[in-house]
Image: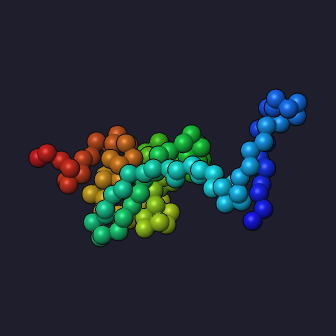
């Protein structure tokens, strides 16, 4: 098996301009990978699993573009953008067709509960 030389750009005592470390091809390819973005998981009333990922600024921009300035639609657009159901993106139209309990559970999972509704599954009454 051949060795791969990895350099870090520092000077070594022997006067060379780069320090060298020897690694096998397997070690060179085993660099740590960043973790997948975490999301909040919700079991929907029909048994499917929804995951609401943590949003970014670009998600807000996309939601604003999609809702054409309609503030009442914006929170649903962002929820649609951030949510997958059984690994598939959640279409806005599918979100609008969901039972209100599922929609409010997704809103709670996303941290967006400005609608004033609480999910019967989580309400204290």
Residue at (31, 62) in percent of width and height: 43
Percent position of residue 66, x then y:
57, 51
Residue located farthest toward the left when viewing the structure as drawn: 125
Asked which quadrant contains residue 44, the reply is bottom left
Q: Is residue 15 left or right of residue 35?
A: right
Residue at (24, 47) in percent of width and height: 118
Residue 60 seen: no
**Which of 30/107 is in front?**
30
**Which of 81/76 is in front?**
81
Q: Up-down: is 69 above or below 50?
A: above
Percent position of residue 24, x then y:
71, 57
**Which of 87/108 is in front?**
87
The structure's colour scheme is: rainbow
Residue at (46, 61) in percent of width and height: 84
Percent position of residue 20, x then y:
78, 42
Residue at (33, 42) in percent of width and height: 113
Residue 20 seen: yes
Q: Is residue 1 left or right of residue 68?
A: right
Percent position of residue 14, x then y:
85, 32
The quarter of the picture where the N terminus appears is bottom right
């Amino acid at each position: 098996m051949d060795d791969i030389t990895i350099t870090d750009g520092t000077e070594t005592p022997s006067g060379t301009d780069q320090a060298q470390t020897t690694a096998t091809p397997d070690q060179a390819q085993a660099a740590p990978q960043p973790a997948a973005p975490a999301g909040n998981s919700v079991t929907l009333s029909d048994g499917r699993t929804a995951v609401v990922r943590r949003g970014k600024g670009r998600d807000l921009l996309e939601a604003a573009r999609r809702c054409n300035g309609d503030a009442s639609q914006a929170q649903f657009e962002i929820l649609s953008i951030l949510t997958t159901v059984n690994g598939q993106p959640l279409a806005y139209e599918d979100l609008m067709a969901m039972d209100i309990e599922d929609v409010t559970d997704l809103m709670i999972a996303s941290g967006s509960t400005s609608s004033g509704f609480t999910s019967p599954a989580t309400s204290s009454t």
